[in-house]
Image (cartoon, rainbow, N blue to C red):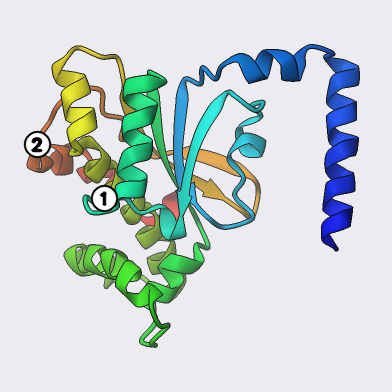
Amino acid sequence: MKLDELLENNRHWSDAVKEREPDFFTELAKQQTPEFLWIGCSDSRVAANTIVGLQPGEIFVHRNIANIVTHTDMNCLSVIQFAVEVLNVRHIMVTGHYGCGGVQAAMEDTRHGLIDNWLRHIQDTASFYEDILSPLDQTACFDKLCELNVIEQVINVCETTTVQDAWAGGQDVTVHGLIYDISDGVLHDLDISVDRRRDKRELRRRFSSVIKASAEGR
């Protein structure tokens, strides 16, 4: 497919939307008031709006390889700050997916170049949960590490100064951990939502049932 074809597709889409809702783009241009921030993977198969059936303007999105949140990533931290402090989102959804190429690459004993520095975060998670992962076969280990990566990023979001300050100020914002199954298109709630300040040890205790659950039991 060529760029001209993409532009033509865009025109058809725009015309179809305006035919259904003549004022859609006029109203959309005035402001954005999403209730949700989606922190997800860059994987082309995991498109936030499409998966949850929301229109443009209804979900604020940040994506990177393997949906990682670190305290040195100014891009991600800026997105979180804008979403919480300016857009006043009520829900932050850290969304991983089974079959994640970033997680798979982190499991391999192979050099991949520059991205190895980014994947180190997932490898650290694998090391931390080695007792959970080591008894599993390769497929189950892969699935479970995708889930554990989401859990670790939920903890990291909860520890950001933006979210901590929001909770301290009484702002209504909840951090969720979700995982998407590409094989059937279903989004799963990992049942690890956090809506107030908790320290990392408390969060790990609270998430223990999810962490220990068998990957085959999802």
Question: On the image, numbered disc 2 is attached to which residue?
Answer: 199
Q: Is residue 44 visible?
A: yes
Q: Report crowding for label 1: few under 14, some 14 to 19, many 20 or more residues within 10 A (C-alpha).
A: many
Residue 159: x and y in percent read: 17, 39
Can you give x and y, in whole percent of width and height, for residue 136 in the image? 34, 70
Judge left or right: residue 8 versus residue 132. Answer: right
Q: Residue at x 12, y 31 (%)?
A: 198
User: Mark 1 and mark 2: span between their CA atoms?
Assistant: 13 Å
Q: Quadrant of residue 128?
A: bottom left
User: What is the quadrant of residue 196 in the picture?
Assistant: top left
Who's the residue at 21% across and 69% down the image? 130
Badge 1 or badge 2: first in the primary sequence: 1
Q: Where is residue 133 drawn, in percent x and y?
A: 28, 67
Residue, far bottom: 110
Residue 90 visible: no
* Placement of 38 over or under 109, stated as above or below: above
Q: Are marks 1 and 2 in contact (CB under 8 Å)?
A: no
Q: Is residue 134 left or right of residue 53?
A: left
Crowding at label 2, few (<14), some or many (≥20) Cα neighbours within 10 Å? few
Q: Is residue 139 left or right of residue 92?
A: right
| Screen quadrant of the N terminus | bottom right
Against 76, residue 164 (above or below) is above
Q: Nearer the viewer, residue 140 or 114?
A: 114
Q: Secondary structure at mark 1?
A: helix
At a point 36% along the width and 86% down the height, the residue shown is 109
User: Is residue 104 depicted above or below 196 in this figure?
Assistant: below
Q: Residue at x 33, y 67 (%)?
A: 118
Amino acid type assigned to the residue bearing label 1 in the image: Glu
As drawn, the label of residue 152 is: 1
Q: Which residue is more in the foreground, 136 or 127?
A: 127
Q: Secondary structure at mark 2?
A: loop
Kind of residue at disc 2: Asp
